[in-house]
């Protein structure tokens, strides 16, 4: 991809496997991308496509039996995978932080919101006194749009509503001013009106704090709204990547096209039948030899079942992994066989 | 779909309150007002979509119409026969009606008994209603149902955990279809499924409706899906129906301020359009249904609220033909 030193994060050929009793599951199978400063990258995919696993390995939160088995993750020139436990701890929070789908899994129910915010801050920045940290925590809560922050700071997570908890979690993630925020389905559990509030908030904060964001979601609408670039993942591979406009208006990979045409749209004028992607996602324990999407693909060719397609550049900063892009050369071969 | 528009179900002033266990025995008993005076008519052959945020009472409404929850008060008429009327104290035995009214649940893995095979799950309804004579006919019927929803005959001997989420939902649909119903409540049937599977199930529901002349009450929080599948949409907020109209009219010309905000919050899979549009952001959160606001229930968050809204509850009135709105403005 782009050889540019200005990239905040560079992932090269990352492979993550889960070693389960039933066998090795290649959850992420060789993905590469780079993320610039102040950029929002969306990662879309269905459940099991490896989108979360990939993000967890960036922040070093991969749980056993998951293991990074290959590739590199470079953050501002340093390889994250070589970090010691202590370095990783400094890295997390200060440079990278994460927000999760369900805020209750992240917030401790027996500590007040304030306590948790102050703890996060004082852990990573030894210069803070408790009073100063508290002041900063209140500021942070106000920034994420929690009214009456002075009072709210002493409340427990259960006293907050779902949307407020998500706001508190964003405050906690951003309190150390990280350069990269990983958002793992932050709005999936929320109602649309609250989702809209949180998205507006994240856009706003992103401009103010100049944070890069990796935004993981399965909702194409959310991606269209907040992301600059998008990677579409299917079964551990990035099948298409590019600027949001390119991917949405000129999708190249059959899977991306399928996703877009199978989503009902609010702006459709006539009631058209949805075009679903037939079949079910593949079993990662026994992945096919060829293209992972091959068995469900309308345009599946012989080569698709034999070999995995490489990611090729189909436009400016627009990549897609599909044999269809090689079709011209392939036609000859097809004729022979 | 149907042009004759004969009403299949009429619901009048349906209420469902859930008592809340208080800690103080001397305190006045509290109720969650999950559904508060909802009236609507569901016509034969149509799909009525219900949208709203979590906690707005849409699921409770669906279940109360089926009398899976006993209504607190109101009147439900099915095909001209009142099956529940709190004033006339009518509450009929529901068993014969269960053959006509069925439900598809949200979470397919939770609604299928893990210790029963798929064949037993689908066949149970056939046994209860004595729809089959003999084992052979029963097995044939189960096969037919499984094929209808895109499963194979051999799947009948498997257990629910052997299926993916989409397939489990298909089993749930086959079970609902087993008794050959006229009316199905689809309670968020696709929200637990993956995006690429959702459209498969939506298409299947549409096909089944055309083949079997079904009437759907389609409950979901995803407005784009509801708009796609429904003929009419009802919008609920805090237990009340605030707007009810033809689905395309509702989405293009919403009248109620809540509908407007709800629609503007839906993310569009179109980068230019979604960034260009002006979004109406609501302040605050949904009030507790334990203690709903007086007057219009939306007035605490409504940008246009007046004194009248704070005092007087607006009724659902027909503003344009077939377009019902509950708002003073």
Image (cartoon, rainbow, N blue to C red):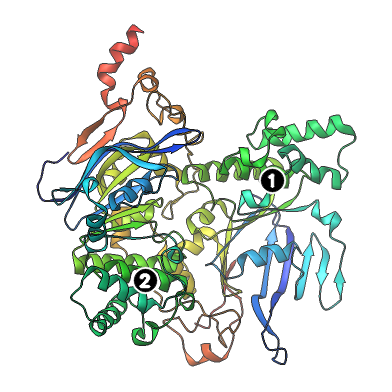
Q: On the picture, is A194 further left or further right than B35?
A: left
Residue B153 percent location from the top left of the image: 70, 29
Task: Select label 1 or label 2 by which is in front.
Answer: 1
Q: Secondary structure at mark 1?
A: loop
Q: Chain of mark 2?
A: A
- Report the residue at 20% width, 34% height from top: A313
The image quarter in which residue A259 lies = top left
Residue A179 bears which disc, if any?
none
Q: On the picture, is B192 further left or further right than B33?
A: left
The image quarter in which residue B164 lies = top right
Nearest the eye: A46 or A88: A88
Q: CA distance from mark 1 to mark 2?
A: 38 Å
Residue at the disc numbered 1: B114
Figure check: A6 above or below B10: above
Residue B126 percent location from the top left of the image: 82, 43
Q: Secondary structure at mark 2?
A: helix
- Report the residue at 71% width, 39% height from top: B118
The image quarter in which residue A70 lies = top left
Q: On the picture, is A242 further left or further right than B84?
A: left
- Is residue A279 visible to us here? yes
- Is residue B255 visible to us here? no
Residue at the disc numbered 2: A167
Residue A81 percent location from the top left of the image: 24, 45
- Report the residue at 21% width, 46% height from top: A82
């Amino acid at each position: 991809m782009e050889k540019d030193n200005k990239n905040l994060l560079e992932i090269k050929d990352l492979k993550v496997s889960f070693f389960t009793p039933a066998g090795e599951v290649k959850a992420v199978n060789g993905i590469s991308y780079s993320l610039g400063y102040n950029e929002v990258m969306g990662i879309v995919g269905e459940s099991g496509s490896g989108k979360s696993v990939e993000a967890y390995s960036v922040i070093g939160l991969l749980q056993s039996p998951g293991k990074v088995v290959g590739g590199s993750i470079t953050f501002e020139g340093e390889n994250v995978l070589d970090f010691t436990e202590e370095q990783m701890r400094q890295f997390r929070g200060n440079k990278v932080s994460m927000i999760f789908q369900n805020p209750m899994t992240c917030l401790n129910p027996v500590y007040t919101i304030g306590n948790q915010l102050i703890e996060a801050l004082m852990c990573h920045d030894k210069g803070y006194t408790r009073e100063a940290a508290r002041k900063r925590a209140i500021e942070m809560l106000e920034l994420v749009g929690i009214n009456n922050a002075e009072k709210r700071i002493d409340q427990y997570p259960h006293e907050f509503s779902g949307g407020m908890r998500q706001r508190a979690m964003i405050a906690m993630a951003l309190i150390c001013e990280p350069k990269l925020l990983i958002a793992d389905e932050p709005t999936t559990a929320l109602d649309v009106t609250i989702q809209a509030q949180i998205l507006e908030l994240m856009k706003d904060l992103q401009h103010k704090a100049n944070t890069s964001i990796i935004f993981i979601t399965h909702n194409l609408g959310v991606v269209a709204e907040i992301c600059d670039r998008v990677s579409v993942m299917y079964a551990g591979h990035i099948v298409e990547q590019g600027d949001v406009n390119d991917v949405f208006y000129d999708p190249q990979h059959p899977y991306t096209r399928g996703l877009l045409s199978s989503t009902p749209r609010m702006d459709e004028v006539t009631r058209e039948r949805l075009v679903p992607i037939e079949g079910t996602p593949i079993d990662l324990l026994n992945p096919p030899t060829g293209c992972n999407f091959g068995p469900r693909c309308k345009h599946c060719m012989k080569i698709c079942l034999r070999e995995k397609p490489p990611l090729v550049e189909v436009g400016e900063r627009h990549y897609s992994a599909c044999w269809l892009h090689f079709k011209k050369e392939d036609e000859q071969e097809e004729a022979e066989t | 779909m149907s042009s004759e528009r004969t009403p299949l179900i009429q619901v009048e002033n349906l209420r469902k309150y859930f008592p809340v266990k208080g800690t103080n025995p001397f305190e006045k008993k509290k109720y969650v007002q999950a559904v508060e005076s909802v009236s609507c008519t569901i016509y034969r052959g149509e799909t009525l979509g219900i949208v709203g945020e979590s906690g707005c009472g849409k699921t409770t409404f669906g279940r109360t119409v089926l009398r899976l929850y006993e209504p607190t008060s109101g009147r439900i008429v099915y095909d001209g026969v009142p099956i529940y009327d709190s004033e006339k104290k009518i509450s009929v035995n529901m068993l014969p009606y269960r053959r006509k009214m069925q439900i598809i649940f949200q979470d397919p893995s939770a609604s299928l008994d893990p210790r029963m095979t798929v064949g037993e799950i689908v066949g149970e309804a056939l046994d209860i209603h004595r729809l089959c004579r003999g084992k052979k006919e029963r097995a044939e019927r189960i096969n037919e149902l499984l094929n209808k929803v895109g499963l194979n005959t051999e799947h009948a001997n498997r257990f629910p955990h052997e299926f993916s989420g989409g397939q489990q939902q298909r089993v749930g649909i086959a079970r609902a279809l087993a008794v050959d119903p006229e009316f199905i409540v689809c309670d968020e049937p696709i929200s637990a499924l993956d995006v690429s599977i959702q459209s498969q199930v939506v298409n299947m529901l549409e096909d089944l409706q055309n083949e079997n002349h079904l009437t759907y009450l389609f409950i979901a929080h995803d407005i784009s899906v509801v708009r796609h599948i429904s003929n009419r949409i009802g919008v609920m907020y805090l237990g009340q129906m605030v707007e009810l109209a033809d689905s395309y009219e509702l989405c293009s010309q919403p009248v109620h301020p809540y509908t407007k905000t709800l629609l503007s919050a839906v993310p569009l899979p179109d980068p230019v359009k979604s960034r260009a549009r002006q979004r109406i952001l609501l302040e605050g959160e949904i009030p507790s249904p334990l203690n709903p606001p007086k007057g219009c229930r939306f007035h605490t968050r409504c940008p246009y609220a007046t004194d009248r809204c704070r005092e007087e509850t607006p009724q659902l009135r027909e503003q344009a033909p077939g377009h019902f709105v509950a708002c003073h403005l």
